[in-house]
Amino acid sequence: MSTPCYVVGGGIIGLLSALELAQAGEDVVIIDRQPVGQEASWAGGGILSPLYPWRYPEAVHPLARWSQDIYPELAESLRRETGIDSEWTRSGLLILDAEDSRVGVDWCRSHGLNAELVDPEQLSRLEPGLRNGSGMAVSLADVAQIRNPQLIKALVQRLRSLGVGFREGLAVTGFRRTDGSLRGIVTESGVLPANRCLIAAGPWSAALLETVGLDLPLRPVKGQMLLLKGESAPVSHILIRGARYVIPRRDGRILVGSTQEEVGFDKSATAEARDLLFSAACEMVPELGNWQIERHWAGLRPGSPDGIPYIGRHPEIVGLYVNTGHFRNGIVLAPASARLAADLMLGRSALLDLGQFSLVRM
Ligand SMILES: Cc1cc2nc3c(=O)[nH]c(=O)nc-3n(C[C@H](O)[C@H](O)[C@H](O)COP(=O)(O)OP(=O)(O)OC[C@H]3O[C@@H](n4cnc5c(N)ncnc54)[C@H](O)[C@@H]3O)c2cc1C
């Protein structure tokens, strides 16, 4: 009897992987221990670029480029098919006061990105709402954003229309194997017969992999965010200074991020981070001092040591695959990662060299 192809985890990585598999004609079921799309994939900022692209390992770049190219088409096709607009918007990104601005611009240009070094005068013409006294900035005019909670809603609706199954509220606890091949997925309420399964459970993937003898160096990295509400948005670009950023959304609100905290699976939003983020935003854009904090939350990034995701097969269990470890860039990297995971599972020729994403890479 044929069994479905299972995806464990309904974040952006699991949902897009399921879409790739379903569009290739596979019978797909997503299992999540809670309603899908409630974790980092909901909590994230939706910037469709690594924050300082030149500071990442080379392997991240082709994943980002491929995904950036496909995002407008993906958002538009989901809008057409579901009526849900995920608000893909080319806001442009201004990176303020980076000490390696010149290196950054050179790197970006050599990687085919549209990058300019902008002096303080040009900067205040581009963004009059910025605090006076900013130094040189890097402008990446093609960088876009997406409203990730909307993207998730659209994906879920699209997947349902393709007949993908959802088993929400069901936690996976392990796997059964016989003679080196996957035979079942162990859940809280029994074993599901299975011979193909993709683990896309964010930072919780590490615990699942431990049950099958694989020690992946994956850790949760907490990030806190604020949503600000005010009169009319004083900026139109995404702005980054140091580790903090400001994202002007289409609905006039502003997102402020983010912290990077190594506190295990603790997802609490703290007063300390709220104050830090708010003052960093006001430091960049003084007018935000008159805005209200409408919401404050935290999410857990699936942190890999180098920011390079793990996309590959389990080294010993035929039929068991992994797609996780996207750290700060899971939203931007998701389309390419999903395509790669599906290439691997379906035996298609792969979009990119899979070796660099292997679970057992050195
Ligand atoms: C504050 C913040 C800001 C960010 N900003 C950006 C940004 O601007 N741009 C960008 O590209 N990225 C950003 N990121 C990173 C991005 O959000 C993540 O890399 C990405 O969402 C990870 O997606 P995922 O599907 O792997 O994991 P998740 O979204 O965590 O999904 C994992 C799913 O697995 C399920 N699950 C876990 N364990 C089990 C189990 N045992 N059984 C069944 N189901 C299970 C969970 O319930 C969850 O639904 C940000 C992250 C944070 C926290």
Image (spheres, helix red, strand yellow):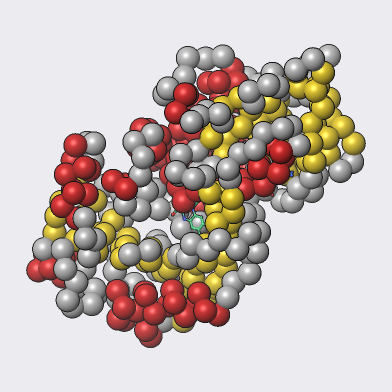
In the image, residue 11 above or below residue 278: above
Judge by depth and name the residue closer to the eye, 54 or 90: 54
Task: Give percent across and percent down for residue 208.
Answer: 72, 40
The residue drawn where x is 59% and y is 17% is 346
The location of residue 77, given as percent across then percent down, is 47, 36
Q: Is residue 80 visible?
A: no
Position of residue 6 measured from the top left corner of the image (x, y, whole percent): 71, 30
Q: Give the quarter of the image for residue 319.
A: top right
Left or right: 237 as drawn, with respect to 126: right
Q: Is residue 23 above or below residue 308?
A: above
Q: Residue furthest bottom?
A: 290
Task: Please give left or right for residue 181 compared with residue 280 in the image.
Answer: right
Which residue is at 63% across, 69% downward? 268
Residue 117: x and y, percent? 14, 55
| Whether residue 203 is visible | yes
Q: Quadrant of residue 166?
A: top right
